[in-house]
DNA sequence: TTAATATTATGACTGTTAGTTATATGATTT
DNA sequence: AAATCATATAACTAACAGTCATAATATTAA
C-alpha cells in the first residue's frame, strides 16, 4: 500500500498548504475581508480546488481555530503538571492565558471571533472546538479541586462553577487587549498592570481564608508567577493632580 | 414653520418604522440572515428607500443596539440613586445586568454581536455606543468609589480597574445564558444558580475585610438583592452518586 | 390655477463573493 | 494501451449590499 500511502500523505500536505495560506490571510485581515479567491491565489490553486479539501469557508476557518485551541490546551496541561499548591496552579493558568494572548494574539482573535455567533452549530468542527475549550476548563476545574483538597482554595466553592467563572473572566480580561487597551491607557495603566492587578483583585475570591494555607499574590511569585506588579507611579501621579 | 415641522416629524416617524421593522427581524434572525430586502419587505418600502434614512446596514443595526444600551443605562442609573452602601449598589448593578439579560435577551445579543469585531470603528454610531457603555461603567465606578469611602469595599482597589473587571465579568457571566446554558444544566445547575453563585464567589474580592463594614451576600437581601439562592439539592444529589 | 422646485420613493442596475458543476488533466491499475 | 480513479479547473449560479437614473408626490412661487 505504498502508493496509496503516498497519495494520502500528499493529500494531507495539500490540505496543510491551504490551511497555512488561509492562516496568513486570516491573521492579517478579518473573516469578511478574506475571500476564498484570495486564499486560492495565496496557495496558487483554483478556488474550486479548495472546496475539494474543505466543505466551506467556515470549516476552513474553524480548522485554524482548532490549531489555536490545541496550543492553549498544551499550555494548560503544563501548568497542571507542576508540583505546586492548587491555588498556584490556578494562578499559573490565568497567567498562561495572558501569555497565550501575548504570544498568539492572532489565534486568540480568531477563537473569539469563532465563539461569537454566526458560525453554524452543525459544523463538526464547532463541536471539536467546544470540546477543546472544554478540556481546558476541565484542567482548570481539576486544579481548583486540588486547591480545595490542599486547603489553599475556599472549600465552599463548587469546582465546576468556579472553573466557569474563572475561564470566562480570564477570557474577557486577560485576552482582550485589542478591545480595551485604549481605555486602559487613557487612565494611565499599561495592559500588563491591568492584567496583574486583576490577580490581586480576584485572589480573595478564591483563596481560603484559613490561616495555615491562606495565600496572597505575592506568595505565587516563587512558583513562576510574574504578574505581580503593583500600581505604577504614573497612575498615582495622575491621581494627585 | 408648521409644514417643515410636520415633514420633520413624518421623516422621524418613517425612520422609526424602519428601525422597528429591522428590530423585529434582527430579533428573530442573525445579522447575516436578515437582508436589506427582507427589512424593506417588512416595512413595505423599497430597499433603496431605506438607504435614504440609513447610510448602510451596519448603521441601521447599530441604531437598534443603541436603543438597547439606553435601557441598560437607565437600569444602572436607578441602582445608583438608591440610598444603600456602596457594595450593595455594586451588587444591585450586577443584578440589574442579570435582569436586563432576562428581560431583553435580544437587545443583549445584538449588543454582544456589535461588540465583537466586523463593525467599522469609523461609524459614528460605534462611538456613541462606546460612550453609552462607558457611561454604565462610570456609574459602576462611582458606586465602587462610594463603597471604598463608606468602608464596605476594599480600600486597596482602584475604582477604575475594578469597574472594568466587574463590567467584563458581568457581561461574560451574567448575560451569556444562550452560550453557556447547556453546559451549566448538564452539570445539574440552573442558570439562575449559576448567576447567584457568582455573587457568592466574587463578593470576597470586593468586600472590605474590616469587621465594622464587612458584608456578605446574605446582607444584600434586605436591599432588594434576590440572587442569593444556595446550591440546590439536585447538584448535591448528583455528586453523591 | 399652473409652473417651477424640492423631497421622497422606486425599479433596474453594478460589483462582489460563496458555493456548484461539467469538463479536463494526469496518475494508477488492469 | 485502455479503463479507472483522483485531482484540478474554468465557467457558472444565486444572493446580497449598495448605487443611480428616473418617477411620483408634495410644496412653493407666479
Image (tube, coloured by chain):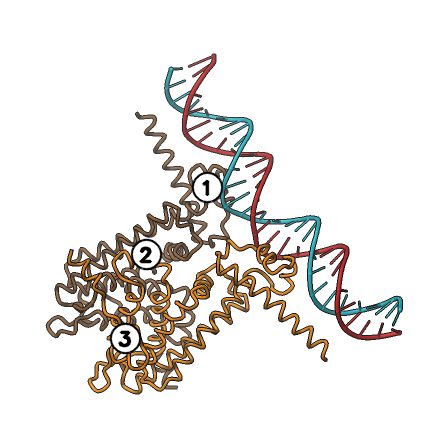
Chain colours: A brown, B orange, C cyan, D red
Q: Is residue B228 left or right of residue A222?
A: right
Nearest to viewer (mark 2 / mark 1): 2
Image quarter (top left, top right, bottom left or bottom right) of the C terminus of chain A: bottom left
Closer to us: A11 or A130: A130
Q: Alpha-carbon distance for marks 2 and 1?
A: 39 Å
Measured from the top left, where is residue C17 in percent x and y? 53, 47
Determine which residue is flagged by label 2.
Answer: B182
- Few, some or many C-alpha atoms within 10 Å of disc 3 (few <14, some 14-19, many ≥20)? few
Point out residue B185 in the picture as x, y percentages from the top left corner. Answer: 29, 58
Residue in the picture at 25% in, 63% down: A161
Q: CA distance from mark 3 to mark 1?
A: 48 Å
Q: Chain of mark 2?
A: B
Q: Secondary structure at mark 1?
A: helix
Quadrant of residue B178 within the rendered picture: bottom left
Tags 2 and 1 both on a single chain = no
Label 3 vs label 2, nearer the camera: 2
Please give the label number shown on residue B82.
Answer: none
Q: Is residue D11 above or below residue B154?
A: above
Q: Secondary structure at mark 3?
A: loop
The residue lying furthest to the left in this view is A212
Which residue: 38% across, 80% down?
B79
Quadrant location of residue A217? bottom left
Q: Residue at x 38, y 78 (%)?
A: B140
**Residue A185 spot, x, y in % from top left:** 40, 72
CA–CA distance in space, label 3 to label 2: 39 Å
Give the answer, above or below, for where B32 lies relative to A6.
below
The numbered dot on residue A230 is 3
Is A226 placed above or below B84 here?
A: above
Which residue is denoted by mark 1 in the rendering?
Answer: A43
Q: Chain of mark 3?
A: A
Q: Tell me the quadrant of the picture where the N terminus of chain A can be found.
A: top left
Amino acid at each position: 500500500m505504498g502508493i496509496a500511502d503516498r497519495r494520502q500523505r500528499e493529500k494531507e500536505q495539500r490540505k496543510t498548504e491551504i490551511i497555512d495560506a488561509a492562516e496568513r490571510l486570516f491573521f492579517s485581515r478579518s473573516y469578511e475581508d478574506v475571500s476564498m479567491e484570495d486564499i486560492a491565489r495565496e496557495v496558487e490553486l483554483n478556488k474550486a480546488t479548495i472546496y475539494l479539501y474543505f466543505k466551506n469557508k467556515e470549516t476552513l476557518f474553524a480548522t485554524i481555530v482548532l490549531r489555536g485551541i490545541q496550543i492553549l490546551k498544551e499550555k494548560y496541561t503544563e501548568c497542571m503538571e507542576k508540583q505546586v499548591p492548587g491555588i498556584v496552579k490556578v494562578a499559573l493558568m490565568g497567567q498562561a492565558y495572558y501569555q497565550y494572548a501575548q504570544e498568539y494574539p492572532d489565534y486568540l482573535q480568531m477563537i473569539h471571533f469563532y465563539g461569537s455567533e454566526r458560525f453554524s452549530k452543525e459544523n463538526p468542527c464547532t463541536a471539536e472546538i467546544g470540546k477543546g475549550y472544554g478540556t481546558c476548563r476541565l484542567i482548570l476545574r481539576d486544579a481548583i479541586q486540588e486547591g480545595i483538597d490542599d486547603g489553599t482554595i475556599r472549600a465552599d466553592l463548587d469546582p465546576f462553577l468556579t472553573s466557569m467563572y474563572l475561564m470566562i473572566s480570564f477570557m474577557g480580561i486577560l485576552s482582550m487587549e485589542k478591545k480595551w487597551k485604549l481605555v486602559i491607557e487613557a487612565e494611565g495603566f499599561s495592559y500588563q498592570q491591568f492584567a496583574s492587578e486583576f490577580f490581586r483583585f480576584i485572589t480573595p475570591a478564591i483563596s481560603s481564608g484559613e490561616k495555615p494555607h491562606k495565600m496572597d499574590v505575592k506568595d505565587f511569585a516563587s512558583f513562576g508567577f510574574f504578574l505581580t506588579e503593583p500600581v505604577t507611579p504614573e497612575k498615582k501621579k495622575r491621581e494627585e493632580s
